[in-house]
Image (tube, rainbow, N blue to C red):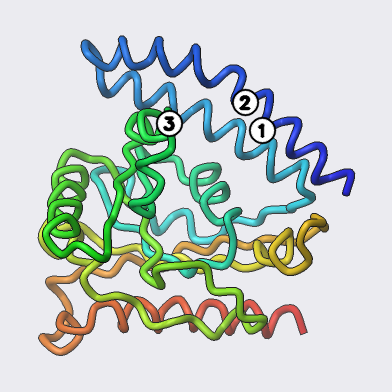
Amino acid sequence: MIRFILVALCLLLYLLLFIPTMLVLLIVKRFKPVTSSAIAQTMVRITFRILLFLAGAKVEVRGIENIPKDGGVLFVSNHRSYFDILAGYAYTHKPLGFVAKYEMIKVPLLKQWMDLLNCLFLNRKDIKQGLKTILQGVEKVKSGVSIWICPEGTRNLNDDVTNVKDFKEGSLKIAEKGKVPVIPVAIYGTYEIWEQHLPFMKKSNVIIEYGEPIIISELSDEEKKKLGAYARNKIVNMLENMVKEKR
């Protein structure tokens, strides 16, 4: 419970600083949008690392060399916990935005802050709105901003980390239409921080592994057709290897 209280206090402090900072950055964005996003992401990266530390997460990052230094990419990962987003922002050193649920757009001030962080809001119930979001993602990756999406669609709270839900194929259109690599990301250990034993937080060894880039133009027609399944298999293989290590 102490960890939960520390995380809550840190979040409260972050929120107190967040509103005035956001107002300043929104003004800066009018003249220097790249600078405002870079400042916002640096703030979030530092804050999220602190939150992970307070929550008891010991994070190991693997495969960082697989991330291209230049240009945007599409990160696709399994989704076990809210802490996945914290880990993604904290340990990915590229301009980055997450694809979030459309419902978050209704939260006062949060939308403006997430806009600064290059986030997109996906409405899976509205095909037209969903297509618009995909096209926004295409523009972002073409401009050099990477996008992170969890194609399972929601948190997978199954106790078996390798039991990854089927990926929604449409979400990977960002990479296909943007002509950028897909980076499969396997996340292990975040579920054990909090979701496994709500409301308590416990220590956990977290692993973030970035797989080798998937170059869509090098795939067969069948693999291109089922790109989500192809990326999912890469992630499952990485997770299975992590499970074997822990035995």
Residue 221 vs 62, above or below: the answer is below
**Residue found at x 28% / y 55%:** 122
Whether residue 99 appears in this view of the structure is no
- Nearer-the-camera pick, 173 or 131: 131
Q: Earlier in the sequence, mark 1 or mark 3?
A: 1
Asked if marks 2 and 1 touch (Cβ < 8 Å), the reply is yes
The quarter of the displayed image where residue 142 is located = top left
Task: Give the residue at the far bottom of this rendering.
Answer: 222
**Residue found at x 15% / y 89%:** 222
- Residue 244: image location, x then y, percent: 68, 85
Which residue is denoted by mark 1 in the rendering? 11
Which residue is denoted by mark 3 in the rendering? 108
Q: What amino acid is found at the position of numbered circle 3 in the picture?
A: Pro
Asked if marks 2 and 3 touch (Cβ < 8 Å), the reply is no
Instruction: Please identify, in this view, whether the residue under mark 1 or under mark 3 is nearer the observer.
Output: 3
Mark 1 to mark 3: distance in Å? 17 Å
Give left or right: position of 26 versus 209.
left
Which residue is denoted by mark 2 in the rendering? 14
Residue 5 vs 165, above or below: the answer is above
- Nearer-the-camera pick, 142 or 158: 158
Q: What amino acid is found at the position of numbered circle 1 in the picture?
A: Leu
